Amino acid sequence: LQSQCNGAVERFNQSFINKLAKFVYDDIENWSNMVNTALYSYNICNISRLGASPLNLLYSREPYDFSLDNLTNVMISDKSIGELDKIRNKLINETIKKREKEMADLPKKDLPDDLKEGQLVRKRKFAYEMGSKFESSWSVPFWIIKNNGKGCYWIRCLDGNTFKINRRDIDPIEQDNES
């Protein structure tokens, strides 16, 4: 009996070789000098499916950014960082206000949960239920038994069968109030 794995080793090897190939593209003879760089690059890159890097998953922390060591000659004052942060927050707030105004200006639609329990409705026939193109595309009557919210309803037909259906596929039947 041989032990088996779920392919994680093979997947790592494939990903690592792809990373290494990007680093040694110009200088294939010196590929061994780039192994550490490629391994570091693999460890800090986010895995899109997981939303985290291997280093973050293993050690629960973000990697140290060595590129900051190259900026030793550049001095950034706290004042400029604070100003940048204020500008960024101001732009974010302006964008949010603009988007809220755009949303408020959109035409209002009827709420999808406008039907009540016990109300008579007709159901749109599905394509497989249609006999001919001259036949009505609505079947009647159904009663709403439950409103699940967000336009989802449970309806019951005359023979007692129940269906879960979206609001766009049902239409209320207007009843005449005769006294």
Image (cartoon, rainbow, N blue to C red):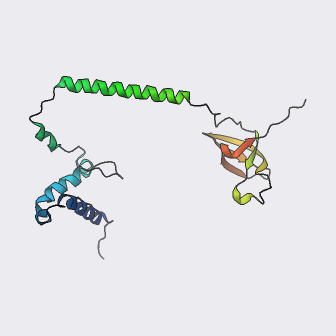
Residue 70 locus on image (x, y percent): 11, 41
Residue at the image position 25 percent from the left and 47 percent from the top:
56
Between 31 and 117, the one nearer to me in the picture: 31
Q: Position of residue 62 (x, y in %)?
A: 23, 43
Q: Is residue 106 above or below residue 35?
A: above
Q: Residue pushed farthest front? A: 26
Q: Please provide percent x and percent y for residue 131.
A: 77, 60
| Residue occupying the point 70% across, 57% down | 127
Residue farthest along the bottom direction in this orientation: 1
Q: Residue at x 52, y 30 (%)?
A: 103
Residue 11 visible in rendering: yes
In the picture provided, is 23 more to the left or to the right than 132?
A: left
Report whether 115 appears left or right of 150.
Answer: right
Q: Quadrant of residue 61?
A: top left
Query: Residue 153: in sight, yes or no?
Result: no
Residue 28 lies left or right of residue 177; in this view the side is left
- Name the quadrant of the C terminus: top right
Q: Position of residue 94 (x, y in %)?
A: 40, 25
**In the picture shown, does residue 66 fall above or below 10?**
above
Q: Nearer the viewer, residue 65 or 28?
A: 28
Q: Is residue 19 above or below residue 86?
A: below
Instruction: Say which of 85 and 174 sits in front.
Output: 85
Of all residues, the one furthest to the left in this rendering is 73
Q: Nearer the viewer, residue 2 or 148?
A: 148
> Quadrant of the image for the N terminus?
bottom left
Q: Quadrant of residue 84?
A: top left
Q: How many marks?
A: 0
